[in-house]
Amino acid sequence: AQSVAQPEDQVNVAEGNPLTVKCTYSVSGNPYLFWYVQYPNRGLQFLLKYITGDNLVKGSYGFEAEFNKSQTSFHLKKPSALVSDSALYFCAVRDMKRYNNNDMRFGAGTRLTVKP
Amino acid sequence: EAGVVQSPRYKIIEKKQPVAFWCNPISGHNTLYWYRQNLGQGPELLIRYENEEAVDDSQLPKDRFSAERLKGVDSTLKIQPAELGDSAVYLCASSPSPGTVHGHTGELFFGEGSRLTVL
């Protein structure tokens, strides 16, 4: 079965600095990869996805993520962090080979704190 | 376009009481999911519906949890009786069924969640 690991429970960064939130995955086939953001007392909001093609994908709010097949990673990045980016971030994976009959698996989440 | 609607947003009950959560998915989305999110954790799937059929309920604790999606649109998740360990956020999500919407590639659309506190 597919799985996702987010090795950092918390990431702290100063406003204006670049940020990276790490994610590694495990699937038997080719992956569909996703990033979601969750603000306090809210549901999960879709940020971006990798399906196929260019390894660097761009998403909402200036975020981007880089797919690295050899390292089975899909790290979330942003060149210049904002205080308003502070939230909980989840990486998720679906197995494309079994897309028609599988669910989305989420990591445990990484809490990003951006300090002024 | 309206998003996924869930109610209630918050519910506080005593243990052994019943509780029910309701979800209205995005119009046209045939696939509906219920996830449970414990504090500090990622969401974990409880049940997935394709129209009115529960196609994956392997993670649903069937002794006390039940779910239904009678007309293939709205869904209800019930817990009876509730236990202290059921305190969590219950998230509903929807998506088009694979191949039914051109360009859709697997992302789920989530509601705001229903936060349950069992005392």
Image (tube, rainbow, N blue to C red):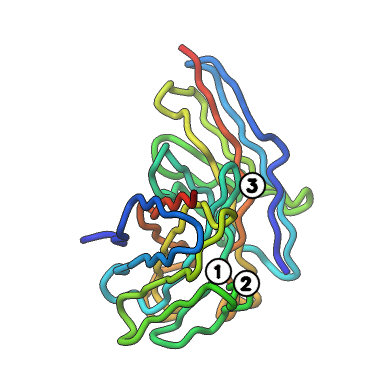
Dot 1 and dot 2 residues touching (CB under 8 Å): yes
- Name the amino acid, label 2: Gln
Q: Which mark is residue B46?
A: 1
Dot 2 and dot 3 residues touching (CB under 8 Å): no
User: Which chain is disc 3 placed on?
Assistant: A
The residue identified by callout 3 is A108
Residue occupying image coordinates x 53% and y 24%? A113
Of tags 1 and 3, the one toward the viewer is: 1
- Tag 1: Cα neighbours inside 10 Å, few (<14), some, or many (≥20)? many
Count of marks, rendered view? 3
- Tag 3: Cα neighbours inside 10 Å, few (<14), some, or many (≥20)? many
**Same-chain check, marks 1 and 3:** no
The residue identified by callout 2 is B59
Q: Is A56 or A88 nearer to us in this picture?
A: A88
Q: Residue furthest left?
A: B1
* Corner quadrant of residue B102: bottom left
